[in-house]
Amino acid sequence: MRPVRIAATLFAVKLVRILLATVAVAIALAALAVVGLAAPGAVSPNTSAARAEYCPAGEQQARAAAVKRYVKQMKAAQKRYFKTTRSAKARKSFVRKQQAQLKTLKRALARCD
């Protein structure tokens, strides 16, 4: 008879452990939900206090104008470069560098609050 009682006790212990683990997970998810609803920017992986920048008056407009100017001159710069360079590899590299510069300018604009 003794082995039956031990098996029943072990089952009860496992059941309690599973119940406690489930409750712990539920509490953790509830806490994350509260934080996510209260401050959505706090749980976003792309948002960071280190990335935020203070921009004085007019800085955001200046950055937007820089992006617009760069986009406007990109085609002309490509045309000039392609006129003197026949290498497909060099042309591709030039376009990649232009895209990287544009991405940098857009990121700077996005960081400005």
Image: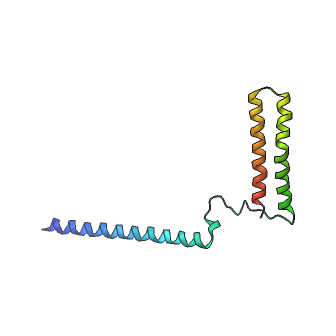
Closer to the camera in the image, 2 or 4: 4
Residue at the image position 86 percent from the left and 50 percent from the top = 69
Give x and y (percent) for residue 35: 58, 71
Quadrant location, the N terminus: bottom left
Residue 78 appears left or right of 4: right
Q: Quadrant of the C terminus?
A: bottom right
User: How many dots with numbers?
Assistant: 0
Left or right? Give the position of 1 relative to 39: left
Q: Quadrant of residue 33?
A: bottom right
Q: Position of residue 31 (x, y in %)?
A: 52, 72
Q: Where is residue 70 in the image (x, y as percent from the top left)?
A: 83, 47
Q: State the residue at coordinates (85%, 55%).
A: 65
Q: Is residue 34 left or right of residue 87?
A: left
Question: Which residue, as the protein is rendered here, is positioned at the far left?
Answer: 1
Residue 10's place in the image compared with 82, above or below, is below
**x, y (%) of residue 99?**
75, 43
Q: In this view, does 46 lie to the left or right of 77?
A: left
